[in-house]
Image (tube, coloured by chain):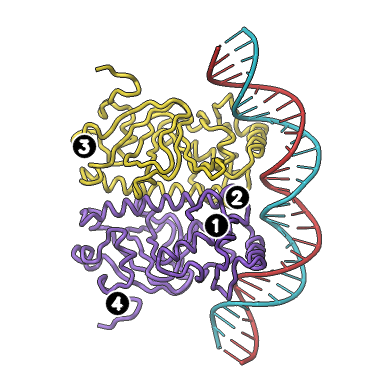
Chain colours: A purple, B yellow, C red, D cyan
Amino acid sequence: MTHTAARSPIHCHQCSMQSVCVPAGLTPDKVEAIDLSSRKAQVFNSKATVFEAGQKLSSVYAIKSGSVKCFTLNESGQQQVTAFHLVGDIIGLEAIATGAASTYCETLETSMLCEIKLGSLFDQNIDGVHQNLIRLLSQRLSHNSRQYINIVSTSAEQKVASFLLLLSEHMQQHGRSPAEFKLPMKRTDIANYMGLAIETVSRIFTLFKKQGIITSDQSMLTILDRKKLHNRSVPFTTTE
Amino acid sequence: MTHTAARSPIHCHQCSMQSVCVPAGLTPDKVEAIDLSSRKAQVFNSKATVFEAGQKLSSVYAIKSGSVKCFTLNESGQQQVTAFHLVGDIIGLEAIATGAASTYCETLETSMLCEIKLGSLFDQNIDGVHQNLIRLLSQRLSHNSRQYINIVSTSAEQKVASFLLLLSEHMQQHGRSPAEFKLPMKRTDIANYMGLAIETVSRIFTLFKKQGIITSDQSMLTILDRKKLHNRSVPFTTTE
DNA sequence: AGCAAAAATTGACATAGATCAATGGTGGAT
DNA sequence: ATCCACCATTGATCTATGTCAATTTTTGCT
């Protein structure tokens, strides 16, 4: 039996990202106890499709590394980005209700995702998986609501500032540096996600650089002046 | 013992809105079996506060009649509307994770809400309550994502058209007329929710009236030409 | 490393929608 | 029924951001 990076089942207790699953109640040994095939780590190349809108889906995916974007397509094939998900996020939650994905989901870079099949987890409430899943979903609702506030009724500058701060917080919450991280998504995607023109996003990045708030080397972003960035963000979403 | 309209416990099997709770897995007799005090119907006057941001909350509320708006406040006391909820919706779902409400929630008109205490329902998975709650939450995520698309990256006209269509669909799904219903929220709230100026919203209503797409008598809205309205809405969110 | 394609930046201009201001309606309280 | 405060409408400007176009930078491939 040969193991490729993309295929070999990685045991949960060996997984460096246990913290991804544990909040979901997907405690490694319990998952293992139910069904050895219920979770599978997989490497996806950049721009790989994780799932498509309308596709039957009875799994969720934990992002162990990398990032994805979710989007819908209209008749003329234009994308509308609905979400970005980074390390530590669990994707596919919107599909639980219907059993079918409501968006396309594509990796933004080489990423490792762990597929978690819901079947047996859904039927029996092993070790509080249900409660944890409920909490996870509820958390996501809060998070989305906050994102919503970032988007609506604010200037382009506030949108971009809030977006960067939210990414930064996410990084911190997942043990990464909040001041320096990779922006895996293109300007186009950011612009699309926030309902702005790409040129506007670009100009705001330039502005923030001129003001000494951020710098960027390729896709690495450095937040130089968190306070200033915060001053330029949306007032409702303040955590700090 | 005296019973006031606002206080008298209404038994679930007498409730005309069973359909509100049943999708949440909150099957009347099962709820009853666990804890007689776990659900309580209450009448709220217009503009009454259901809960406040930050408030400890371990219940959800089913809207049996009426409507509410959820909003956050910034330092200077300005509102940002994050959601409207109508008959048949369940509110307070975002609070499950943290046990505290993340928004203010206020009735838009006289409304009857049924408080459902989660305590015992959360601990034991009676008759699939957990699974149903998970489905409900997942559904809400999908719905929000669709709302998001309505707001982002579209013209004011598309936003308003989509907003009206979504309300209309909701009414249909809850056995009301999709062509004629009450708009319980003020123009200001609609504008705030969608990130538009109130004047813009007003102008678009006027435009739609001139084009024979809608009429309105006070707060009653009539959709005269659904097809036209749909043509003016956001292409991504098409259900019809 | 070098080249081609994709992405980002920058500038000039156009416009949708915000803002300001005045007027007209509606509904709740007395 | 009347009044007053709130809400909606309409018109006249102004401005933030979109659009178009040209250039530079980055990225990925051979």
Considering depth in this image, is B102 or C3 the residue closer to the camera?
Answer: B102
Q: Where is residue A147 in the image (x, y as percent from the top left)?
A: 50, 53
Q: How many marks?
A: 4
Q: Are marks 2 and 3 on the same chain?
A: no
As displayed, is residue A112 above or below residue C18? below
Q: Do the residues labelled 1 and 4 touch (CB within 8 Å)?
A: no
Q: At label 3, which amino acid type do we have?
A: Lys
Q: Which mark is on residue B30? A: 3
Q: Mark 4 points at which residue?
A: A8
Q: Name the residue under label 2.
A: A154
Q: In this view, does B157 lie to the left or right of A240?
A: right
Q: Is residue B200 left or right of residue A173?
A: right
Q: At label 1, which amino acid type do we have?
A: Ser
**Marked residue chain, label 1:** A
Alpha carbons under labels 2 and 1: distance apart: 10 Å
Alpha carbons under labels 4 and 3: distance apart: 44 Å
Residue A2 shows in this picture: yes
How would you rate the neighbour count of disc 3 (Cα within 10 Å): few for under 14, some for 14-19, many for 20 or more?
some
Q: Quadrant of residue A225?
A: bottom right
Write the residue at 35% across / 58% down.
Answer: A57
What SS does tag 3 mark?
A: helix
Q: Where is residue B84 in the image (x, y as percent from the top left)?
A: 48, 38
Q: Mark 1 points at which residue?
A: A162
Tell me the mark number nearer the camera, choosing from 4 and 2: 2
Q: Position of residue B116 (x, y in %)?
A: 30, 36
Q: At label 4, which amino acid type do we have?
A: Ser
Q: In which quarter of the image is residue C6?
A: bottom right
